[in-house]
Image: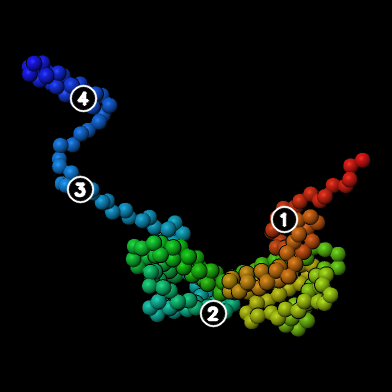
Amino acid sequence: MASSLNSSFQTSNLRNVFLGKKNEVCVSSVPVNRVGFLRKTVVCKESRIGKQPIQVPSNVTITLEGQFLRVKGPLGELSQSYPREVNVEREEPGTLKVKKAMETRRANQMHGLFRTLTDNMVVGVSKGFEKKLQLIGVGYRATLEGKDLVLNLGFSHPVRMAIPDGIKVKVEDNTRITVSGYDKSAIGQFAASVRRWRPPEPYKGKGVKYADEIVRRKEGKAGKKK
């Protein structure tokens, strides 16, 4: 009786081993309290935008003092302070490089952002930026009165907007507005504030829109079917 039990036990063990190899199941004989997990350090990839160098033209002056950068060009002067997660360095004459100071999630976020802001500063003081707007609608028009931009957008009164310092506004044909300057963020903010007075509506397209903006149109209500 004992011999039959031993033979059946060995047969079941062999069957389990065979099935385990067939199904590629690995059974560990190490006690549970000795099993450990290996933690692999994952190195974050460098930002594709952040690792690109910034070319500085010859007519632009760079002043770097620790985490503070001042850029001066023929169109104006801009400055920027940088967080401790990134550093700005001069690698070669006429070249700037933004690098990460530490390997953290916030540093990865700040890397590409501040590289773009630095490049916008250099391009702004040397070449400048512009944003174009267009007025669409019957009676919609824009005029310049001194340092104010006056808009007629179908309200009971005209809209008067003061033009900030460092920004130039040009009006053509009373319906096309060009906002230009050396500070890209200020240009975008002023253009957005102009558009906010009358955003383009989707049925007839009336309103203030960017020149390169595509307004998705909707179909109006259909008449009563007979």
Check disc 1 and give the amino acid type.
Val
Q: Tell me, for residue 92, which label it has, or none.
A: none
Labels 2 and 3: the sequence-earlier one: 3
Labels 4 and 1: the sequence-earlier one: 4
Q: Position of residue 222 (x, y in %)?
A: 84, 47
Q: Which of marks 4 and 1 is in front?
A: 4
Can you see residue 90?
A: no
Q: Do the residues labelled 2 and 4 touch (CB within 8 Å)?
A: no
The residue carrying mark 2 is 77
Tell me: 186 left or right of 80. Answer: right
- C-alpha span from label 4 to label 1: 68 Å
Check disc 4 and give the amino acid type.
Asn
The residue carrying mark 1 is 215
- C-alpha span from label 4 to label 3: 26 Å
- C-alpha span from label 1 to label 2: 36 Å
Tell me the SS state at disc 1: loop
Binning the other alpha carbons within 10 Å of mark 3 as few (below 14), some (14 to 19) or many (20 upward) gives few
Check disc 3 and give the amino acid type.
Gly
Q: Tell me, for residue 16, which label it has, or none.
A: 4
Q: Tell me, for residue 36, which label it has, or none.
A: 3
